[in-house]
């Protein structure tokens, strides 16, 4: 890995962003942590999948930098688990660098893939690009007669305001952006309420119940998938 970090110190800080580094090589972890911390990122660390799972369960990071070959399993398996209910941006950072390896990582749900060894400036630029893409929120989402004005935080059916609360709108937007995809109730809670679910998702159930009533004339509803979560779909 090239330790060149020229040109990185005069960029704006990245305060408020939390990154999870999942890496079992202490030297690689140390170098990556140092450059990210200098940029103002809050950095959490895991050296295996057990620690990574615990870290995500405790507090979902804004992005994950993920090694594949870890002491207790494959980072690809962990990524597949995440993608069942989470769209946390993930940069795969691994010594497995053949075209087949890269294709496998991206198809497993990786948003970007950087083989080792790599230049630290390139690594930092990839992280910045990953976060930029994740922050790109559309101005509006349209599903049939339903129109979500993301800027205003309002939802309309044929022009009539559905009068959603802040939590109702945030939950509906997240589900609508993942139409026909089941999202885990705990994931929804942690994304909307910004704190660990700790097994209690009654608040999600309550908001979903209110939303179903308000969506009655839109042609869409929110379906509960037993033991799995909720999905937004036509009815």
Image (cartoon, rainbow, N blue to C red):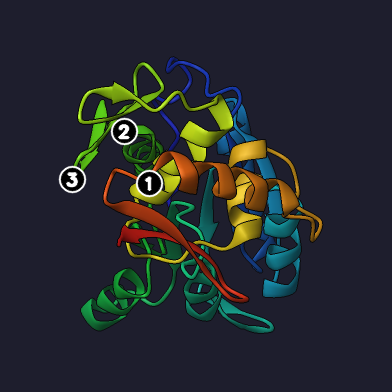
Residue under pointer 3: 144
Residue under pointer 2: 136
Q: Residue at x 41, y 38 (%)?
A: 131
Marking on residue 216: 1
Give the label, 2 or 1, closer to the camera. Answer: 1
Q: Is any atom of residue 61 visible in this view?
A: no
The x, y position of residue 190, in whole percent, is: 65, 47
The x, y position of residue 202, in whole percent, is: 74, 52
Q: Residue at x 44, y 51 (%)?
A: 89
Quarter of the image with the N terminus is bottom left
Q: Earlier in the sequence, mark 3 or mark 1?
A: 3
Q: Residue at x 45, y 23 (%)?
A: 163
From the viewer's side, name the closer residue of 213 and 78.
Answer: 213
Q: Earlier in the sequence, mark 2 or mark 1?
A: 2
The x, y position of residue 176, in whole percent, is: 35, 48
Q: Is residue 206 above or below residue 163?
A: below
SS state under label 1: loop
Q: Is residue 108 above or below residue 183?
A: below
Q: Earlier in the sequence, mark 3 or mark 2?
A: 2
């Amino acid at each position: 890995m090239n330790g060149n970090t020229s040109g990185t110190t005069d960029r704006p800080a990245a305060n408020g962003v939390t990154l999870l580094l999942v890496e079992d090589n202490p030297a690689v972890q140390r170098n990556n942590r140092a450059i990210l911390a200098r940029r103002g990122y809050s950095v959490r660390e895991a050296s295996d999948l057990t620690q990574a799972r615990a870290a995500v369960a405790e507090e979902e990071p804004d992005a994950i930098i993920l090694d594949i070959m870890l002491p207790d399993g494959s980072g690809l398996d962990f990524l597949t688990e995440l993608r069942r209910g989470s769209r946390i941006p993930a940069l795969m950072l691994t010594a497995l660098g053949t075209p087949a390896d890269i294709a496998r990582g991206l198809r497993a749900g990786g948003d970007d893939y950087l083989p080792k060894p790599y230049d630290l400036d390139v690594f930092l630029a990839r992280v910045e690009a990953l976060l930029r893409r994740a922050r790109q929120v559309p101005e509006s989402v349209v599903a049939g007669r339903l129109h979500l004005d993301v800027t205003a935080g309002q939802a309309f059916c044929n022009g009539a305001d559905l009068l959603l609360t802040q939590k109702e709108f945030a939950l509906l937007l997240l589900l609508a952006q993942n139409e026909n995809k089941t999202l885990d109730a705990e994931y929804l809670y942690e994304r909307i309420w910004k704190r660990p679910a700790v097994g209690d998702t009654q608040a999600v159930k309550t908001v979903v119940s209110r939303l179903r009533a308000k969506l009655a004339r839109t042609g869409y509803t929110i379906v509960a998938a037993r033991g799995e979560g909720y999905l937004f779909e036509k009815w």
